[in-house]
Amino acid sequence: MDVRQLEYFLAVVDRGGFNRAASALYVSQPSLSQAVRALERDLGAELFHRIGRRVVLTEAGEALIDPAREAVRSLETARATVASVRELRSGRLDIAAMPSQAVEPLTTLIRSYTERYPGVAVAVAAAFTARDVIAAVRTGAVELGLLASVGSVADKEVRSHVLGEQRFVLIVPPTGPFAGRKAVNCEELAGQRLIVGQPGTGMRAYVDALRDRGIDFTVAVETEHRVALLPLVLAGVGLAVVTESWRGIARRTGADVLDIEPATALQICLVSRSGALSPAAAAFWTNATSPTANT
């Protein structure tokens, strides 16, 4: 039994005969009759009494009308739902992002995407390292990932697109060290108390590299919670080395943001699984990687 057979059955019921039903469905009368006969064989019961050119529903036929209409309506609903997702009138998009990149460029990318596709809900999952982002994409936990890396993404199981770069900056309180400055040399971080990320992150790799160069500083706080960075800086606990994705929000909270010289930057990459993407994910990828995307 298939839904097409049920649609043919209902057409005969609604049109009062096989000839009228065939005309309404734009099929030949023999094809319609064969489909109804096949349905009767599947059900093991006759659905119509055939009296000359007239048809009269049997008891089994009467009993089938409501279930048949429900099945056909369910299929129509399913088709409409799929169509709405394909046209991005509704749906859901799952993205994994590292904390700093979730500030920017993800905020700008989501704003642009939701302006175009307001019916699609975007769910952002936290991933603390580039490896975590790639794993989430590779295993199918999410469709897209946003990460920062020192070099290109080498994993062959995902595809990647470089969206740009983010340099490292220093967030300082307005009345603390380096007040009024616009830039600071990395060697000037010697003797300072720094707030850093956990091992495995780009910001932690950067400050560890500074220490390896002989720049001696004190780690005041190591935190996985990026939301704690600005409160800790403004409270005078230490200075934070972060990517410039934090520049705007840090200044709005009253902190100063200094470029660290010489400039060192991370590549910002959007990654996806290698196979076909859902319509929602494909649209996000296209929107984010277009030449006019504001990242």
Image (cartoon, helix red, strand yellow):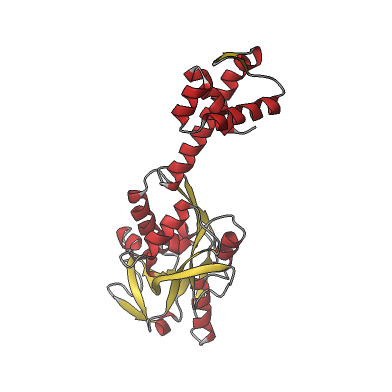
Please, is residue 130 above or below residue 124 in the view? below
x 35%, y 80%: residue: 184
Q: Nearer the viewer, residue 33 or 64?
A: 33
Residue 164 or residue 20, whichever sits in front: 20
Point out the image quarter for the N terminus: top right
6 left or right of 257 in image: right
Residue 130's quadrant in the figure?
bottom right
Give the mark count.
0
Q: Nearer the viewer, residue 75 or 220?
A: 75
In percent of width and height, residue 23 lies at 45, 28
In which quadrant is the C terminus drawn? bottom left
Residue 160 in the image: above or below residue 122: below
**Residue 228 visible to the viewer:** yes
Name, please, the residue furthest toward the bottom.
213
Q: Position of residue 5 (x, y in %)?
A: 59, 30
The residue at 45%/81% (across/down) is 190
Q: Where is residue 282? Give x, y as percent.
A: 45, 57
Q: Which residue is most to the right? A: 44
**Residue shown at the point (58%, 27%) measured from the top left:** 33
Residue 35, image x and y in percent? Answer: 60, 31
Is 241 on the left-hand or right-hand side of 176? right
Q: Residue furthest front?
A: 52
**Can the viewer see residue 105?**
no
